[in-house]
Image: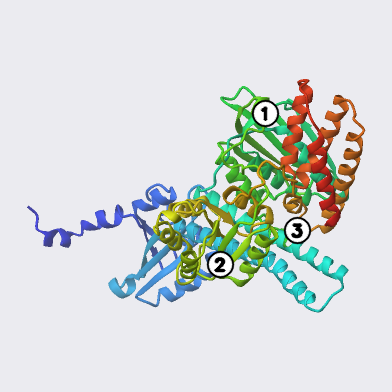
């Protein structure tokens, strides 16, 4: 057996270490002429064995690196060793790859005027670093945009609050409060976008499976966006090829959210021409499939930006955000909402010509009788609240003021505990019908307080405990349930949200009395963004529609005319958040179409109540 000493002396190990090594090894003269290449040069660059021999090293260097590398070469010929020099070397196919090399000067070692270049391919590393740098820049830009979008309404609220402390007139107070409401609605839209993205990416969002009519959603959208298009001088075209009576089983709220985002973007980025919404079905697919197409004649998207248009922290152009505002999360939300429901979304766009977004979503088909059937996510019918005794466990003074005021306005007797330990003391001394429990508190948090209450004896086993928290994910709700709470109320909550909770868990003695509906402009303000003029004009249009419809219905028209009047009113009801009344009208339409007896008395009463509420805005 050959000795290791002889093996080393003969130098044959160079063949396995150098010729077959992963790094590319070149031996070049001080002038750059290549005298040796190992096998890695063929594997990495595509050059056959000895193809580089006698060629000049500098002929293969990227022009952008050439001047720098020539200067370094002059330094290398005077030094024994040089480490970590980067350059781009041309491959056989004409492309360039990144290398990092160490050089050994043979003049100092062997008295030969040449350099050994040990070149490591770092192309992938450079690519990853560039992607990380781009992602970081995009994230920083996104955070800067979000910061601006959040600070703007907060600064407005703070400034107007200071004006309210300066004894303004009654008219000024109304104006200031209206501005504060508008700013808070804008803030909620931004925060909801961020929370939606977080929930979607964590897989915690829940999709409902309830029956709905597609055309009801389309009617509401058209009524909403027609005003914006008219204001900008745009044509809003709707090509709906889905049968009018089609009932789908799925999540109408999330479908509506997808359509709102796509149409809002189309209108926002289009200054002339038209926006088109196309809808059709593909019954040839495995499931009934809805094909959605939203196209515009707007500013379009550069081809280089199209691959990233749906990504988080990525927008076509930072200047777009500065000009048009928004979080830039709309398309991210659309993509994830669609894909998590088993669908797909794609985009075609030409800069300065316009864009077309195509969505494919599968649905099950329902029957007309399915519409209006309750789902677990729908609250119980609202009943008036009695004088329930409520313990509010909340450490924040502003939240205490807001919630306790709402409770008292709803007829409740409210007691306040600043933390969990105080709440336990009050529960030991007083009897309550309901506990509203904040989660994040000092001393004893909401989870631990709820567990302690449940372990305190039979008297507390059935006491309703409702979590109130800004952490609104399904995971947080589950955590509340596991701690012994009955349900969760997400901050910021509206008066109607609190009313529903109270009526479900601390209902009064007036059960069976039909409630009057409450106006909810959340949807309208979400669509309007910061355009207060749009909100005002749409509420005025709603008042006119209610007034005219009430007058015509009181004239006892024929069933056919009644059905037409009610159908015409549905988009307006969606716009002002009267979903309950809208469901009643859908049922009335069905009764009229099937020649069943119907009674309009309660519906007219609810419309009159809504009209009074609009007059007070």
State left or right for residue 228 relative to residue 312.
Answer: right
Instruction: Please tell me the numbered disc located at residue 394.
Output: 2
Q: Residue at x 72, y 68 (%)?
A: 152
**Real-space Cα distance between discs 2 and 3?**
38 Å
Instruction: Please tell me the numbered disc located at residue 247.
Output: 1
In the rendered structure, which disc, 2 or 3, sits on the residue that comes first in sequence?
3
Q: Residue 431: in sight, yes or no? A: yes
**Real-space Cα distance between discs 1 and 2?**
44 Å
Are the residues at dot 2 and dot 3 in contact (C-beta closer than 8 Å)? no
State left or right for residue 553 relative to residue 298.
Answer: right
Q: Residue at x 49, y 60 (%)?
A: 88
358 w.r.t. 558: above or below: below
**Residue closer to the observer: 586 or 308:** 586
Q: Residues within 10 Å of mark 1 (few under 14, many from 20)?
A: many
Residue at the farthest left position: 1
Quadrant position of residue 226:
top right
In the rendered structure, which disc, 1 or 3, sits on the residue that comes first in sequence?
1
136 w.r.t. 2: above or below: below
Residue 38 at x, y percent in the picture: 34, 54
Q: Residue at x 61, y 72 (%)?
A: 397
**Residue closer to the observer: 539 or 100:** 539
Quarter holding the C terminus is: bottom right
Q: Residue at x 72, y 52 (%)?
A: 522
**Real-space Cα distance between discs 1 and 3?**
36 Å
Residue 164 at x, y percent in the picture: 79, 74
Q: Select label 1 or label 3 by which is in front.
A: 1
State left or right for residue 81 relative to residue 501.
Answer: left
Residue at the spot of label 3: 324
């Amino acid at each position: 057996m050959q000795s290791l000493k002889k093996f080393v002396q003969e130098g044959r190990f160079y063949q396995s270490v150098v010729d077959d090594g992963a790094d590319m090894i070149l031996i070049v003269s001080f002038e750059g002429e290549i005298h040796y290449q190992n096998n890695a040069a063929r594997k990495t660059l595509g050059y056959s064995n000895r193809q580089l021999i006698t060629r000049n090293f500098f002929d293969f260097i990227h022009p952008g690196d050439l001047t720098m590398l020539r200067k370094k070469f002059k330094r290398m010929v005077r030094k024994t060793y040089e480490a970590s020099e980067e350059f781009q070397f041309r491959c056989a196919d004409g492309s360039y790859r990144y290398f990092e090399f160490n050089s050994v000067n043979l003049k100092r070692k062997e008295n030969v005027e040449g350099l050994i270049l040990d070149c490591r391919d770092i192309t992938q590393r450079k690519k990853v670093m560039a992607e990380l740098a781009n992602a970081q820049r995009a994230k920083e830009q996104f955070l800067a945009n979000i910061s601006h979008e959040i600070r703007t309404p907060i600064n407005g609220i703070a400034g107007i609050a200071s004006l309210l402390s300066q004894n303004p007139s009654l008219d000024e107070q109304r104006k200031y409060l209206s501005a504060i409401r508008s700013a808070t609605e804008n803030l909620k839209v931004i925060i909801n976008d961020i929370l939606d993205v977080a929930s979607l990416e964590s897989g915690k969002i829940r999709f409902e499976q309830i029956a709905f009519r597609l055309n009801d959603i389309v009617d509401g959208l058209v009524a909403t966006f027609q005003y914006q298009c008219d204001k900008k001088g745009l044509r809003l075209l709707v090509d709906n090829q889905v049968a009018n009576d089609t009932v789908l089983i799925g999540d109408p709220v999330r479908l509506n959210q997808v359509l709102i985002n796509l149409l809002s973007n189309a209108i926002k980025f289009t200054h002339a021409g038209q926006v088109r919404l196309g809808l059709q079905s593909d019954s040839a697919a495995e499931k009934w499939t809805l094909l959605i197409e939203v196209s515009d004649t707007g500013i379009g998207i550069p081809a280089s930006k199209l691959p990233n248009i749906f990504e988080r922290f990525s927008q076509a152009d930072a200047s777009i955000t500065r000009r048009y505002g928004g979080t830039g999360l709309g398309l991210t939300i659309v993509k994830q909402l669609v894909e998590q429901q088993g669908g797909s979304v794609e985009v075609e766009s030409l800069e300065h010509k316009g864009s077309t977004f195509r969505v494919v979503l599968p649905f099950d088909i329902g029957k007309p009788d399915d519409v209006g059937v309750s789902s677990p996510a729908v609250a119980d019918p609202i009943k008036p609240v009695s004088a329930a005794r409520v313990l509010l466990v909340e450490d924040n003074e502003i939240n205490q003021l807001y919630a306790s005021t709402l409770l008292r306005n709803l007829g409740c007797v409210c007691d306040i505990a600043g933390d969990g330990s105080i709440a336990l003391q009050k529960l030991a001394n007083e009897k309550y019908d309901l506990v509203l429990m904040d989660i994040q508190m000092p001393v004893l948090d909401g989870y631990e307080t709820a567990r302690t209450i449940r372990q305190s004896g039979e008297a507390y086993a059935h006491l309703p405990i409702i979590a109130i928290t800004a952490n609104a994910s399904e995971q947080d709700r589950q955590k509340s349930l596991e701690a012994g709470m009955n349900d969760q109320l997400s901050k910021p909550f509206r008066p109607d949200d609190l009313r529903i909770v109270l009526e479900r868990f601390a209902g009064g003695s007036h059960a069976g009395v039909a409630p009057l509906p409450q106006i909810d402009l959340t949807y309208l303000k979400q669509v309007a963004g910061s355009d207060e003029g749009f909100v005002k004009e749409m509420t005025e249009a709603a008042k006119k529609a209610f007034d005219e419809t009430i007058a015509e219905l009181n004239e006892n028209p024929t069933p056919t005319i009644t059905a037409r009047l009610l159908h015409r009113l549905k988009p307006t009801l969606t716009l002002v958040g009267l979903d309950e009344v809208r469901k009643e009208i859908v049922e009335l339409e069905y009764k009229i179409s099937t020649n069943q007896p119907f009674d309009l008395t309660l519906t007219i009463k609810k419309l009159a109540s809504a009209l009074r509420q609009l007059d007070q805005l």
